[in-house]
Image (cartoon, rainbow, N blue to C red):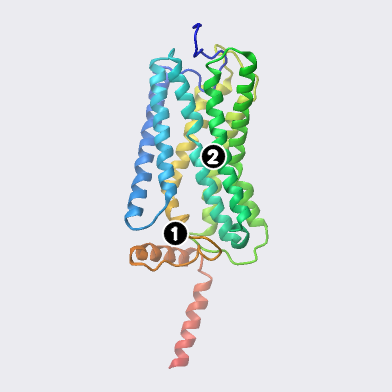
C-alpha cells in the first residue's frame, strides 16, 4: 500500500476494479448508447427551439448523457490503469453524480401532472417552495456525497472514514427517496378528489403521461434502491467481493436502467407530451392556446392528438350541437 494519499480502497464496491478484457468492451457499448442518446436529445432540443417550442428537459437529458459519456470514458481509462487512484476516484464520482439530472427531470414532470390535475393546490406557493427545497437539498447532498467519497481516499483515520461512510449512506438513501417521490406525488394527485377538470397540456392522453413517468421512475428507483441497499451491507474485503457487487449488477442497476429511461423519453417524445406554454404562472395557463404562427404547427398537432385520444366522448356531442345549430339557421 502506498505511504501517501490517495490510498487504495480496502473494501469492495459495486462493479469492482474494471479490467480491459471484461469491462472495456461492455463499457464501450454503453458509451455508444449514451452518445446516441445525447445526439437524439440535442437534435430534438435544437429542432424544437427553431420553431419556438422550448423544452429545457431535453437539454437536461443531453447533459446527463454527456455526464455518462464521461463516466464511460473514465471507466475505460481506469481499466487500462487500475492502480491509478485519482482516475478511480473520478470514475466513481461520475457514476454517483450523473443520475441526479434524471431525478430532477422526473420531479418536473410530476409537478406538471399535479398542476394539471389540481391547478389551485398545484400552483400554491407552498407547493412550489416544497419543490424548491428539494432541488436545494439535491445540490447540497450531491456536494456532501462527492466530498465524502473523495475524502475517504485521502485519510486513514477510522473515525473520519466512519463519518464519510455515514454521509455516503445518507446521500444514497436521500437519492433513493427522491427517485421514488414521483409515485406518492402522482398517485396522491389521482386519489385526492379534484375540484376542477384536468387541464390538458402537451400531446396524448393524460393517463399516458402518468404511465411514462411512473415507468421511468420505477427503473431509476430500482437502480437507486439496489445501490443504497448494497451500501448498507457490512463492508467486505476488496479481494473477496460478494455477488451483489458483481460487474453484471453494476452494469444492470447503474447504466442499463438509465439507458432504458433515456431512450424511453426519446421514443415517446416527452418534449411533446410534457410541454406546457411558456410563461405559465398559475391555474389555467397550461390549457391556454398559443396562436402565434411560429407555434401553429405544434398547436395543431397537439389539438389533433387530444381529439383522438382524450376527447372522443365529447366529439359526437360537439358535432351534434353544430348540426342542430345548422338546422336552426336553415
Left or right: 151 as drawn, with respect to 308: right
Circles 1 and 2 in contact, beta carbons < 8 Å: no
Disc assigned to residue 278: 1
Instruction: Quadrant for residue 125, please give it.
Output: bottom right
For the question of whether residue 270 can be seen, the reply is yes
Q: Find residue 251 and report its horizontal and vertical position in percent.
A: 48, 28
- Residue 40 or residue 207, whichever sits in front: 40
For the question of whether residue 203 can be seen, the reply is no
Q: Find residue 317 and report its horizontal and vertical position in percent.
A: 52, 77
Q: Find residue 127 and report its horizontal and vertical position in percent.
A: 62, 53
Q: Secondary structure at mark 2?
A: helix
Q: Which residue is tagged 2?
A: 219
Q: Secondary structure at mark 1?
A: loop
Q: Earlier in the sequence, mark 1 or mark 2?
A: 2
What is the spatial separation of the Cα atoms under label 1 and label 2, in whole angstroms?
A: 30 Å
Q: Residue at x 61, y 44 (%)?
A: 181
Amino acid at each position: 500500500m502506498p505511504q501517501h494519499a490517495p490510498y487504495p480502497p480496502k473494501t469492495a464496491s459495486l462493479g469492482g476494479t474494471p479490467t480491459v478484457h471484461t469491462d472495456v468492451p461492455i463499457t464501450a457499448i454503453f458509451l455508444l448508447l449514451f452518445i446516441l442518446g445525447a445526439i437524439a436529445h440535442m437534435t430534438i432540443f435544437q429542432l424544437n427551439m427553431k420553431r419556438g417550442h422550448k423544452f429545457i428537459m431535453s437539454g437536461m437529458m443531453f447533459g446527463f448523457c454527456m455526464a455518462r459519456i464521461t463516466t464511460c470514458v473514465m471507466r475505460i481509462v481506469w481499466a487500462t490503469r487500475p492502480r491509478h487512484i485519482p482516475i478511480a476516484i473520478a470514475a466513481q464520482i461520475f457514476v454517483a453524480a450523473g443520475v441526479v439530472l434524471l431525478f430532477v427531470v422526473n420531479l418536473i414532470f410530476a409537478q406538471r401532472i399535479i398542476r394539471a390535475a389540481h391547478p389551485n393546490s398545484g400552483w400554491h406557493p407552498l407547493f412550489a417552495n416544497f419543490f424548491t427545497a428539494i432541488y436545494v437539498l439535491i445540490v447540497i447532498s450531491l456536494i456532501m456525497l462527492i466530498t465524502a467519497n473523495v475524502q475517504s481516499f485521502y485519510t486513514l483515520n477510522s473515525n473520519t472514514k466512519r463519518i464519510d461512510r455515514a454521509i455516503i449512506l445518507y446521500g444514497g438513501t436521500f437519492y433513493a427517496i427522491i427517485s421514488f417521490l414521483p409515485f406518492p406525488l402522482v398517485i396522491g394527485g389521482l386519489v385526492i378528489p379534484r375540484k376542477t377538470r384536468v387541464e390538458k397540456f402537451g400531446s396524448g392522453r393524460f393517463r399516458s403521461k402518468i404511465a411514462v413517468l411512473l415507468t421511468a421512475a420505477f427503473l431509476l428507483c430500482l437502480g437507486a434502491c439496489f445501490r443504497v441497499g448494497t451500501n448498507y451491507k457490512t463492508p467486505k474485503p476488496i479481494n473477496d467481493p460478494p455477488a451483489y457487487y458483481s460487474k453484471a449488477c453494476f452494469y444492470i442497476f447503474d447504466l442499463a436502467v438509465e439507458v432504458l429511461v433515456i431512450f424511453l423519453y426519446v421514443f415517446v417524445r416527452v418534449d411533446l407530451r410534457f410541454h406546457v406554454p411558456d410563461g405559465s404562472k398559475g391555474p389555467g395557463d397550461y390549457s391556454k392556446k398559443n396562436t402565434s404562427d411560429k407555434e401553429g404547427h405544434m398547436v395543431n398537432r397537439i389539438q389533433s392528438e387530444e381529439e383522438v385520444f382524450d376527447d372522443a366522448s365529447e366529439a359526437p356531442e360537439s358535432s351534434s350541437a353544430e348540426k342542430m345549430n345548422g338546422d336552426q339557421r336553415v
